[in-house]
Image: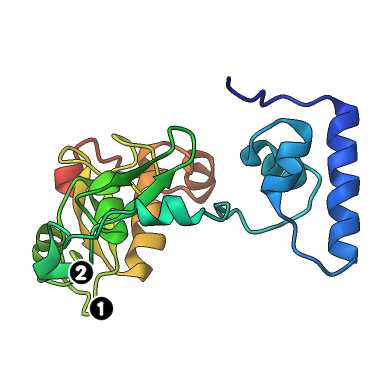
Amino acid sequence: MARPRKLSTEQEAEIVQICVSIMQSGEIINKEIVADKFGVCTTTIYNTLRRAGIKIPHVRTTKELSEEQLELKPDARPCINFEWCGNQELITWNSQKRYWHRSKRCNPCAHLWGAHGITPEEKAKLFEDGCSINSCSREPSVIDHDHFICPQGYHSCEKCRRGALCHYHNSQVIALIDALRDGKLSAELNYLGIKAVIFKDSDNI
């Protein structure tokens, strides 16, 4: 049975009071214990504290596994991208269905595949020519994508992916271009008497 995510105002106030007292005593807040007390998930506890202005690390904590569960843990095999990452596959314990889940990829490779749909080899090829801005000599650090096509952050696909950028050009230049395209700076440009060129095709950037 799924845990409810909504809390009453009184329950939220009680949660905040409990967590504040824990922090004042110098102890670390264990969201799982608080969540079990109120019958909700840890995300609900985290969001409740965030709305109250209490900042705590949003980390997934796992309860201690029994010796029997540890004995059932399978041996890790090399990641399918082992030649590039040199890591073992990711093995996690599913506490709800109570079994070990094996992933073909290690954690970094799984994140890269889930966010961008590419392998470490494809990322290396994307980064080998340096920053996509021709006059830039900095090393690329991020995969740039067109936010007009895919507005999600830390995500790209074949349609929206534009190239690899250094941190400077990703945070400054491309952010400015996206703002111009979305018309967010039209009032400021009209004030300065500047006509903006709105790029409709990301291939022209």
Q: Residues within 10 Å of mark 2 (few under 14, many from 20)?
A: many
Furthest residue toward top: 1
Tell me where residue 40 sits by quadrant: top right
Q: Secondary structure at mark 2?
A: loop
Residue 35 in the image: x percent, y percent? 71, 39
Q: Please indicate whether residue 12 sits to the left or right of residue 60 in the image.
A: right
- Specify the amino acid type for callout 2: Cys
Residue at 16 percent across and 61 percent down: it is 120
Residue labelled with disc 2: 131
138 left or right, relative to 19: left
Q: Nearer the viewer, residue 105 or 197?
A: 105
Q: Quadrant of the N terminus?
A: top right
Residue in view at x 25 percent, y 48 percent: 103
Residue in the foreground of this view, choosing between 128 and 36: 36
Say left or right for 202 vs 97.
Answer: left
For the residues marked 1 and 2, what is the alpha-carbon distance in whole angstroms? 6 Å
Do labels 1 and 2 touch, CB within 8 Å?
yes
The three-letter code of the residue at mark 1 reads: Arg
Q: In the figure, 166 relative to 145: above or below? A: below
| Point 32% across, 53% down: residue | 91
Which secondary structure, mark 1?
A: loop
- Residue 173 x/y as whole percent: 35, 60
Residue 138: which numbered mark, if any?
Answer: 1
Q: Residue at x 89, y 66 (%)?
A: 25
